Amino acid sequence: MTEPAAQQPALPGMPVRRSRAVGAQDIEPATVDPVARVVVDVPVPHLDRLFDYLVPSSMADAAQPGTRVKVRFGAKDVDGYVVERAGASDHTGTLAFLRRVVSAEPVLTPATLALCRAVADHYAGTLPDVLRLAIPGRHARTEDAERPAGSAPEPTAAAPVPGESASAWAAYAGGAAFVQHVQAGHAPRAVWTALPAAELDPEAATHGWAVALAQLLRACHDVARGAIVVLPDGRDVARLQVELERLGLPVVGRNGGAVGRLVADDGPAARYRSFLAALRGDVRIVIGTRAAAFAPVQDLGLVVCWDDADPNHREQRSPAPHSREVLALRSELEDCALLIGSPARSAPAQALVAAGWVQEIVADRATVRARAPRVRALTSAELASEGAVARIPSAAWRLLRDGLERGPVLVQVPRKGYVPVVVCQGCREAARCRECHGPLGLGAVAGDPQCGWCGRLAAGWRCPECAGTQLRFARIGSDRTAEELGRAFPGATVRVSGASTGVLDALPSRPALVVATPGAEPAVAGGYAAAVLLDAALASLGMSMFATHDALHRWISAAQLVRPSGQGGIVALVGDGDPAATAALVRWDPAGFAARDHAERVELGLPPAVRVASVTGDRMSVAAFLDRLTLPPGGAVLGPVELAAEAGESTLAGAPVRAIVRAPRGQGRALAHAVKGALGGRTARKDPGAVVVQLDPAELL
């Protein structure tokens, strides 16, 4: 049942006020379906419903379902979308008129509305919050531009033979069958563990996963089925775009195209152009970053989430949905195929496999061994004969030297910068800022240590524990590592790729040392001759629920760019990383690691075997929220426990606390419903204090 909007619509406790700007008493309502049910952009939990407004006769033709409108809500005008038109309202009071129709373009389709509603319910969020993520801002000039002629793709008379159009899938058990089912109009669901990019083009820096996805999208295009691929960042989108253009599927531009590209960095005009191309049916394929998961593609037959373990797939804005979950919900709502792919395998993806909701697409062990490089773990046990183990042991130096004789060598460093963390020389206590207690670090230019939080220089630093004044390196970043390698190999070219110096996308196949942070590794034509993955202990250390998964994902993502073992490719993992993740890398068995890890999580009751919600705020507010929360069957509350105050945060009201609400996986929707109900009651009563609730938090610190 909808909550109609009177001449207000008034908020609780606010008097009804007739809007004089519209002159409501002088306006005639539309003669057909005069009531518009509108979702208003007011992301408050207890107001997350539709409101009824009258449609002026002058707007009767423009105010159609899906259009953007302005309405009066409380004391101000707000944005909204018309969801439906009706002949009458069940509200007994006076309805307000729509203020104006912003655009007659129906940007909110029924499918998008259903998906946004499902995502909001899944994450205990509000519909307006999700709509902000799903529908880009209007770009009037682009919307009014004439559509390019002949932009809509034409289906072919018959589908090509999968063996010819999707040869990259032949290496996987179930790969060719998945393509066939998608082309036949079925809706298979699968988790794909991609092989290393061994068969790289010797003349160009390509990625094997991009070749496979491009062939799959071409197969969808040839039978006029829509498809969406969501990738972590613009670099991956560009890589897939190159492969699509090789198959005759250019990205949409001012002169048309076959593929829409939705990337926020492209700017509002280009993004809105691709959005409209999908909305109007001019393109059936859309690739892009997170927002592409909501693209209004017609005749949707396939949705793909590539590299779902990448943190870029999680939206930072409320309600913080993950692309993988959005696409999984969409595959259910629209009965389309789903593919979750990655060079490794995330814990949530393994949970779907264990539940039998998806099937596996993996290569056999013989194929994996032929395509993967040889991996050697240089742990302290293996290097015990060297005595004191250096950060870069002699075995790693030899690998770097030998690799440079055969081509480029990759060096992965977990931290950016020069020396991001220093400790006291005497007692090894972490050096912290006197003002905000943030970590101190050193830059490439000699000088006093600087705080990583507030930026203050720590001149005359003295250790509060032992009164020492000398500092020691605790963690070395990519810039310092590149400097050390440049000194050790004076004749070699050293390139740095990362946030501090700029991310390199591709490099030629010439001998060079390439120092990169995780996720910034550039591809090279023909693959790297060798790779050294430094600081394994640091990479796998962390309080995140998925720290070991993240470490293995970073290692495999870098190691897959190395030539196969048959061509001399070798990878060295340096340091005492997590034993299970290290063994999985050496065996190149991310699926086996994920399966064993999931079994342990089921036994211990850890996510994603269970669903959790974090509740953070001051102690009294959190306690009041938990008192009003109705737990689903099997639910439990852990905590609350006190959290360390962030830099600059006032502690006058006490340190914030966090509680964890846990429920069995089968009660996940019930947990989200209960959390949203408690939030709605809190906002309706205007309870004091602040409470932040997040479903499926990425980290619990």
Image (spheres, rainbow, N blue to C red):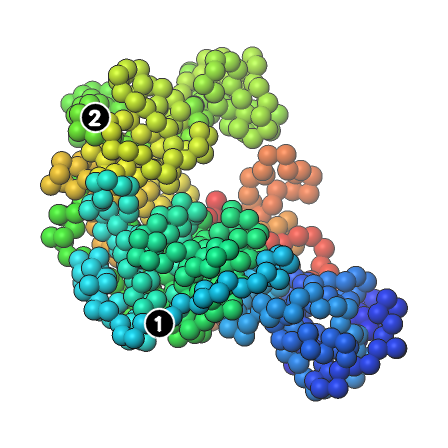
Q: Is residue 277 above or below residue 651?
A: below
Tell me if residue 346 can be seen: no
> Looking at the rendering, which quadrant does residue 595 occupy?
bottom left
Tell me if residue 215 can be seen: yes
Identified at 15% across, 57% down, the residue is 364
Q: Which residue is under mark 2? A: 404
Local SS, label 2: helix
Q: Nearer the viewer, residue 495 or 352?
A: 495
Three-letter amino acid code of the residue under disc 2:
Leu
Q: Is residue 97 above or below residue 290?
A: below
Q: CA distance from mark 1 to mark 2?
A: 49 Å
Q: Is residue 289 above or below residue 222?
A: above
> Looking at the rendering, which quadrant does residue 474 occupy?
top left
> Looking at the rendering, which quadrant does residue 101 occupy?
bottom right
Give the image location of residue 519, x and y in percent: 37, 41
Q: Nearer the viewer, residue 565 or 229?
A: 229
Near mark 2 (Cα within 10 A), the count class, few <14, some 14-19 or many ≥20, is many
Q: Which residue is under mark 1? A: 155
Q: Is residue 560 left or right of residue 696?
A: left
Three-letter amino acid code of the residue under disc 1:
Pro
Give the image location of residue 651, x and y in percent: 66, 38
User: In the picture, which quadrant includes the N terminus?
Assistant: bottom right
Give the image location of residue 450, x and y in percent: 53, 22
Q: Is residue 235 left or right of residue 361?
A: right
